[in-house]
Amino acid sequence: MPSLKTQPVSSAAASSAAPPPAVRVYEVGPRDGLQNEQAFIPTEDKITLIETLADAGLARVEITSFVNPRWIPALADADRVAAGLAHHPRYAEAFTALCPNLKGLSRVDDTPLREVAVFMSASESHNKRNINKSRDETYPKFEPVFAACAERGLRVRAYVSVVWGCPYEGAVDPAEAVDVAERLLAMGAYEVSLGDTIGVGDPAQTHRILDAMTARIPIEKLALHMHDTRGTALANCLAGYEHGVRTFDASVAGLGGCPYAPGASGNLATEDLVYMFERMGVSTGVDLDRLVDAGLLAQRLLGRTLPGRALQALSAGRTP
Ligand code: HMG
Ligand code: MG
């Protein structure tokens, strides 16, 4: 019997027509997932998790955050995580980390990282809670980071958070998010990842947001970063795919949340995303069996069952 994991079911994939466009999967679990955990996961365990994720073939793995460790104590070992992976053959191509300012970049300088990510919010209140600055105060902090990265040949990705809704302000005007995304791209970001930080969005809203974005920004420059607080993350990604988005963020086993966004529970589980796309005949470049190994490892490290649903189904009967 063909494997349920990989057997494509869509008529497009089953026909002799060209396969549907492939996607890139950007793994945020070791950063977005672990930043929210109360327990401090030992550095060696974080490294093993990241290695397992990289070996599964994910296009990128966000390994940690070079932020103030007093703000994000769970990732206070960022420097040691980055150093401990130095031997990894996919380091320069696949690893990346959050870096909000020059202080963060001075720490990145001690690592082999070739990519970093900055982050801002579509709403003023979330930006203040998350970065301790207004949006207007944040751009000048980013400018020297972009300039220094350009000098060093580092790629810079940018996040725009709370695009689908803000925990402090409620509805967010897509025009605000478009403005932030455009400015970050103009500053030198190669891609902007649009975040549904608190997982409130629906597919119709996703199409509206992408309509507003693509009136000013090429779709190739956009990625989606959906949290799954209300179970709509996968549907939003499918809407994004239909709209032309080809890069999706997800978190192993559905780990995740944002400490400065009350109610932001897990990110979309990477296994769920990869399972859906592979079944549709959309190539992700990810080895789902190896990804399940990473999901099981994440569960062991955290000592609890994690929310990823494909992980539970695909690992049933396996020795944990
Ligand atoms: P600040 O307090 O305004 O910074 O923090 P400051 O420049 O005034 O410096 C204050 C102190 O912080 C100084 O130390 C600095 O050295 C230190 P002191 O002199 O008091 O001992 N400091 C740093 N230390 C280490 N590394 C650094 C660094 N920068 C300053 N890089 C800052 C500003 C941005 C640093 C702070 O607000 C912070 O660390 N915020 C972290 C927020 C965060 O990580 N949030 C979660 C990630 S974002 C997210 O989850 C959303 C996302 O997933 C997308 C989505 O879901 O939408 C990306
Ligand atoms: Mg997030």
Image (cartoon, grey):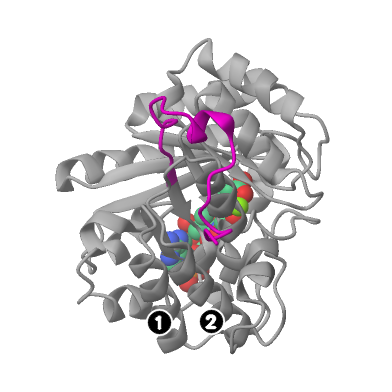
Q: Amino acid at mark 1?
A: Thr
Looking at the picture, tell me which residue is in the foreground, 238 or 135: 238
- Quick check: is 130 in the magenta stretch? no
User: What residue is drawn where x is 81% and y is 56%?
Assistant: 263
The mark nearer the N terminus, 2 or 1, is 1
User: What residue is drawn where x is 59% and y is 84%?
Assistant: 318
Identify the mark at residue 297; answer none if there is no mark.
2
Residue 182 relative to residue 303: left or right: left
Quarter where residue 251 is shown: bottom right
Mark 1 CB near ligand 1 (8 Å cut): no
Q: Residue furthest top?
A: 215
Looking at the picture, tell me which residue is in the foreground, 142 or 27: 27
Q: Looking at the magenta stretch, what is its main secondary structure? A: loop
Where 28 sits versus 281, above or below? below
Residue 282 relative to residue 124: left or right: left
Mark whose residue sits in front, 2 or 1: 2
Q: Are marks 2 and 1 in contact (CB under 8 Å)?
A: yes
Q: Amino acid at mark 2?
A: Leu
Where 172 sits versus 199, above or below? above
Identify the mark at residue 48; answer none if there is no mark.
1
Where 24 sits versus 220, above or below? below
Quarter where residue 5 is shown: bottom right
Residue 219 relative to residue 60: left or right: right
Point out the stretch of residues depicted in magenta. Answer: 1-24
